[in-house]
Image: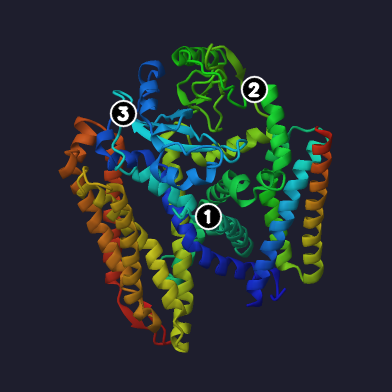
Amino acid sequence: MTKFWSVLGAFAGGYIFTWGFISLMVAGPVYAGLDFHSAEYTAFLLALPVFLLTFFWLFISRQIVLSHTLIFGSGALAIGLSLWLQTLMLNSGA
Amino acid sequence: MQFNSTRQAMAWLHTWLGLILGFVLMVCFFFGALSVFDREIDRWSIPETRFDPQPMPSFDNMLMDVFSRIEPEENEYKRQMPRYHDSDAGPMTPRTELPADEYWAYTTHRDPVLRMGAGFRVPFPKDPESHNHIHGEITIDPRSGASVPDNHLKIGSEWFYPLHYSLNINWNFLGFFIVGIAGFFMLVALITGVWIHRKIFKEFFTFRRDKSKQRRILDMHNMTGVVALPFHFFFAFTGLIIFIAFYYMPVTNTMLQPLHNMHQALEAQQQGLPHERSGIDAPLGSVDAMVTEAKRRWASRDMAGEVGFLQIHHVGDANAYVSIYRAGSDRVSLVGEGIHFNGVTGDVLREDPPHGISESIAEFLTGLHLQHFEHWFLRWLYVIGGLLGCMCIATGFMFFVEKRKQQHANAGSQGSRIVDAFAVTTVTGMIVATIAMLLANRIIPGTTEGKGDIEKWVFCITWALMFIHAVVRSRPVASARSNPAWAAQCRLISVLSFIAVLANWLTTGDHLIKTLITDTYWAVAGVDLSLIASGIIAGVVAHRITALKPVRDTETGEVVYE
């Protein structure tokens, strides 16, 4: 059963990290002046390799608490950052 | 990590995720392989549409009249109208009186028939900013404009094709998510498979038929996995890429929606395409003249071709515009080189510019998966790749059972029996259900009310019966012997395949001598020949399984087959 939770944890961690990765890969470059759709396509093309790498790393990691904290934390941080950038852009209208 | 080594962890992932999600992946690979010829299966299942593919007909002389015949779909009206309509603002418009706002027509180089549709506006909407459309569709014979009866199910493109990406479970997009998760773990299974089988090049060429049954199955599993490894990988990858932005990780349609909307409005401004209706009525100009101009512009860019998709926005309004896209059957990338015209004056408003690098890569990957290109040999390679994927998954199930059934029998466990019953259901049961559906299609008269729905029920009920049969006959597996359901269902596949070919001949007059020689029609001949090939293979397999005699190994005491 613990193996099942390891898979679930790695999948959830990978998903949240990738969600944060996509959002930051869109909001960041758009804030820097890149075209929205180019940023969007680039982010989605890279999303699956990122998801796979994160999943595998979390699943085989021996330092479970550290690796999960790092991945869940950085995913949440990326989401927060991209939301902040979005607010900045919406307020400036650019 | 609860494993002694990374390799052990990878082997565990490969075995258990492969087993659990393999049942879903089997459906995706099998119906994905059939979808390569979905239009041809449509021709087989709707005999009235057995004629050559046609180019987009004249809009001014034919399509405009057909569009005016399209009505909003009754079920969608009942379901969506109360959600879109604001009853405080005004009365609800009856279904057949909804005004059209959008028209589209779509065809490919493999379609004799033309699919057309309309989006109808909802007056007094709750949220005027939203896409408040009730839709209606029609399929016509482009030679005459006559409708193809809507009780006929396009079995290839409307049942088998969506099965491979949504399992036809549309409730809250549940099927899409199940397939998405299975697709992700398919990639995981491929990577872990390569990781645990270090001698990958050697396994490409290894099949030891003189070894034990378990060894032979594993060799076959490895060989079919390795020989089409790039195919398996890119299909799982590109399949996920197609839906990732819409269903699996809709970041820009949820969390970053405000940013997305802001850029969409800016883009519309830059493109010069009217985002909204003006509210002023205006007649539509000659769309045929626009098509001629679009073709001239494509030819000047050395991309001559037919129209694949045509769309009219803001129908009947002064802001109407017409978007015309190429049928891009001469390239892999799914691009339409769209040209947009003012719907009233016919002036060109915009030509889609070449896309950037990442968009081009995404279009290439999407095109590679959806194969709109004209290349029959490559199509067959896709089918072979898909079937190799099925073989890889099926032998994976068999290896799982073979490896454990003696151990489970000794321990009195039912584990192998359960897995084997599911394996029979997803391997042979699925094929029986598919052929039963095709057979039902030929037996049920074309005039029967709800013919398509009956065919769907035949498919589902047959599959359920195959599951019950597989479970009921699986008792020997609990004693480490083989499940007789494998051979029985193979025999059924064989018999049904030949009856389906015969039924096609008797109900349409299209026998193989006619479709192959005297009046060649490859779509129908291809389906018939595939059915015959399936029938022969299934018959041979059934015979060979039945010929195997169980004997007890004198040294190990295990049941083996000779």
Provide the chain ID for the residue under circle 1: B
Task: State the residue position of label 2.
Answer: B353
Task: State the residue position of label 3.
Answer: B141
Residues A73 and A53: in front is A73
Quadrant placement of the C terminus of chain B: bottom left
Q: Horizontal placement of B274 versus B477: left or right?
A: right
Colouring scheme, one of rainbow, by chain, secondary structure, one colour = rainbow
User: Which kind of residue does numbered mark 3 sit on?
Assistant: Asp
Asked if labels 3 and 1 touch by Cβ distance under 8 angstroms, the answer is no
Provide the chain ID for the residue under circle 3: B
For label 2, count other residues whose C-alpha is less than 10 Å away and answer few (under 14), some (14-19) or many (20+).
few
| Residues behind callouts 1 and 3 on a single chain | yes
Q: Disc 3 versus disc 2: distance between alpha carbons?
A: 34 Å
- Which tag, 1 or 3, sits closer to the chain's start? 3
Q: Report x, y in % for residue B483.
A: 34, 74
Question: Which type of secondary structure does the marked residue at label 1 adopt?
Answer: helix
Residue drawn at point x = 52 percent, y = 18 percent: B281
| Residues behind callouts 3 and 2 on a single chain | yes
Q: Tag on residue A67?
A: none
Residue drawn at point x = 49 percent, y = 18 percent: B304
Question: Which type of secondary structure does the marked residue at label 3 adopt?
Answer: loop
Tell me if I can see residue B28 in this picture: yes
Q: Report x, y in % for residue A33.
A: 81, 32
Q: Disc 1 versus disc 2: distance between alpha carbons?
A: 36 Å
Question: Which type of secondary structure does the marked residue at label 2 adopt?
Answer: loop
Task: State the residue position of label 1.
Answer: B172
